[in-house]
Image (cartoon, helix red, strand yellow):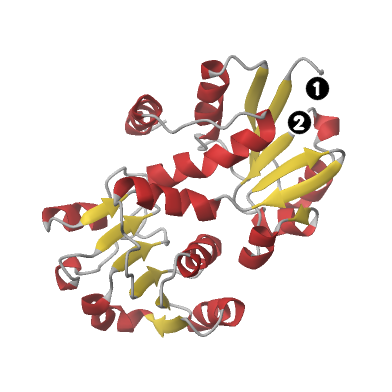
Amino acid sequence: MSEASRAACVIGWPVAHSRSPMIHNYWIRQHGIAGEYRREAVTAEDFVAFASDLAGHGYAGANITIPHKEAALAISQPDDRAKAVGAANTLWLDNGALRSTNTDVEGFLDNLDASAPGWDRELETALVLGAGGAARAIVFGLLGRGAKAVYVANRTLPRARALRERFGSAVHPVGWDEVGGLLASAGLLVNTTSLGMHGQPPLSVKVDDLPASAVVADIVYVPLETELLAAARRRGLRTADGLGMLLYQAVRAFSLFFGVRPEVTPELRAMVETDLQKGK
C-alpha cells in the first residue's frame, strides 16, 4: 500500500455476495480518492493470520462479516461499543495498532431515523426476533435510545437469555411461541433472522396484531421487500428495510479507512437496488 493510495476490503467466508465493494468504491469515486475496496474470501482457520497483518496485505482497514466478527474482536483493540456488543465488524490501523468497532449499531439506528423519523419517541416496548450477532448490536442500540423493554424471541431460549445476561434486566427473553401475544404492545418489531430471505423459510408473523403506530424493520435485503415489510406497508405501518442498514453501517467504516465521511444518497441506493434485482 503506497502513501499515495489506500486500500480496504471486506473479509468473510463466503464473501462473493457482498455489496460492500460497490458501496465503498462508489464513495471512492465520488470523493476523488486514490484508493480501492476489495473482497477477501478468508476461512475461519486463516482469519487470525490474515487480519492480524492487514498492512502486510496492503490494507488500511477491513469490514468483517460472517463468520469472523467475534474473532475480529479478540485480535484487536475494541472500542466500548464493540466490547458491549461482543463482536466487531470493522477493523482499522491506527499508528500501527489494530483497532475495532461495531458499526451495525448505527447502521440500524440511522436507517430507522431516515426511514421512520421519530420512531424512538416514547418507545416503550420493542420486539426483536432472533438472538444472533445482529440482534446483539440492535438490542444495544435500542437500549441506548431509551427503549424501556426489549423482548428477544428465539427458538433456542438460552441464546435469548444470553442477551439478558449481557445487557441487563430491560431485556426479556421469550420463546418463539410467545411472539403472537406480544405484538399488540410492540411499538417496534425487528426481524434479525434469515427467515423471509430468498431461499429460506417464510417468517410467519401477523402484523395485523401490531398497533397502528408501530414501526417494522427487517435486516434481510434479499429480497428488497420481504413479505414482513410488504404486509406492514399494506397495513400502512412505517418500515425500514435491510438495504438501508447495509448502507448506513458503511458510513463510519469508510471514514475510518479513507478519512472522509460519506453520505447515503438516493443515487447510491438505486445503484445497489438495481444490482440486487439482477440477482448478482
Q: At numbered mark 2, what does the secondary structure look like: helix, strand or loop?
A: loop
Quarter of the picture containing the C terminus is top left
Q: x, y (%) of residue 115?
A: 31, 47
Amino acid at pointer 1: Met
Q: Is residue 198 left or right of residue 42?
A: left
Q: Residue at x 70, y 42 (%)?
A: 42
Q: Amino acid at mark 2?
A: Tyr
At mark 1, the secondary structure is loop
In the picture provided, is 189 more to the left or to the right than 172?
left
Q: Position of residue 102 (x, y in %)?
A: 61, 53
Horizontal and vertical percent position of residue 129: 39, 69
Q: Is residue 276 above or below residue 67?
A: above
Instruction: Please indicate, yes or no, whether residue 40 appears anywhere in the rendered image.
Output: no
Vertical side of 14 occupied by 120: above or below? below
| Residue at (45, 82) in percent of width and height | 173
Marks 2 and 1 in Cβ contact (< 8 Å)? yes
> What residue did someone put label 1 on?
1
Q: Which mark is residue 150?
A: none
Residue in the picture at 64% in, 60% down: 81
Marked residue nearer the N-terminal end (2 or 1): 1
Residue at the spot 34% in from the left edge and 75% down from the top edge: 125
Local crowd at mark 1 within 10 Å, few (<14), some, or many (≥20)? few
Q: Nearer the viewer, residue 138 or 272?
A: 138
Quadrant housing residue 32: top right
Residue 236: percent from left, percent from top: 13, 55
The numbered dot on residue 59 is 2
Tell me the distance, in whole angstroms, between the alpha carbons under discs 2 and 1.
7 Å
